Image (spheres, rainbow, N blue to C red):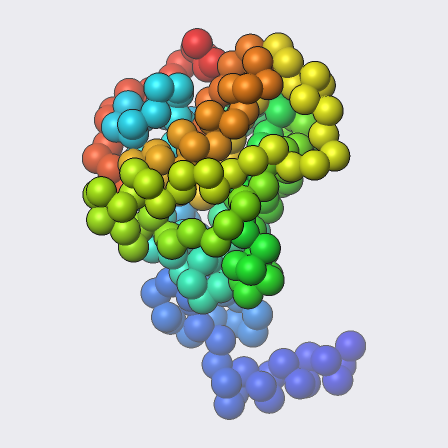
Amino acid sequence: MFIKDLVKTVVSVFLPFRCHVCKNTTQFGVVLCESCLQKLQAIIGPPQITSDTRCDFAVYTLSSYSTFVSDIVKIIKYRPSEKLLRILAGVCKKNSQLESFLKKDAVLIPVPMHSDRLQKRGFNQADLLAEEFSRHCGSHYSPLLQRLRHTRPQADCNEEERLTNLDNAFSLAPGFSPDAFRGKRLVLIDDVATTGTTLRKCADRLLSLRPAEVCAIVVSHSYKKTGLSCRGDYGQ
Ligand SMILES: [Zn+2]
């Protein structure tokens, strides 16, 4: 233990750890400084419905339009940093309304990532969030969808390209019985929504299972703030 601490001290002198967000020096191994953590905790809140996606089902966000959260999501993705993702998931889980929103009957379905990208990044942020939320809230976790082909990030496409970029990109993953999801409440999980095209394409696949409901939860959305907040009327 002593040697481990000594190594940490020596390394931190020559290679100081920095907060991934504000770049201030932190303790060894700390990827988000206390100040940024507090800021994140103040922004992440209860699920709020957003009507500014092109989805014809309910999309809830855990943060109103916030460049700070959007930046964290980007850092997680492009750095990439699973450690920062786990901190973000932990902050989301601390919200008691998330638990009452998901209840135990929800089936959490992560937006899938193509295997090439998964291999490159090492984790799928939607998958990790869905797993963490389900463990915390007692909901079911089902990686029910798969991404059939590699697609360009929606953020890199123009308005027109976004509409077709994801055509035939998703299917039901093998190994699941479609009947098991009939009449269930299916909740898509993703880190971010922009126009909602990805969520809509995923929902199209899920609707073939004849669920009672399909909705989505994202941590952040990059459209304007709606100000609409759900107060116990979740799933309506
Ligand atoms: Zn910081």
Left or right: residue 116 compared with residue 58: right
Which quadrant of the figure has residue 51?
top left
Front-lying residue, 47 or 176: 176
Quarter that holds the C terminus: top left
Residue in the picture at 54% in, 83% down = 12
- 44 vs 206, left or right, is left
| Nearer the observer, 132 or 162 | 162
- Residue 17 percent across, percent down from the top left: 49, 75
Total labels: the figure holds: 0
Above or below 104: residue 76: below
The residue at the point 75 percent across, 84 percent down is: 3
Residue occupying image coordinates x 62% and y 10%: 183
Q: Looking at the image, can residue 136 be seen?
A: no
* 122, above or below 24, in the image: above
Q: Position of residue 115 (x, y in %)?
A: 59, 55
Across and down, in percent, residue 71 comes to: 34, 55
Q: Is residue 18 above or below residue 46?
A: below
Residue 85 visible in the displayed image: yes
Is the residue 227 above or below the residue 41 in the image? Answer: above
Query: Percent from the top left, x then y, of residue 201?
Result: 43, 32
Residue drawn at 38 percent across, 54 percent down:
152
In the image, 180 versus 189, the foreground residue is 180
- Quadrant of the rendering where the N terminus is positioned: bottom right
Relative side of 90 to 26, left or right: right
Q: Single out the residue that lies furthest toward the right.
A: 1
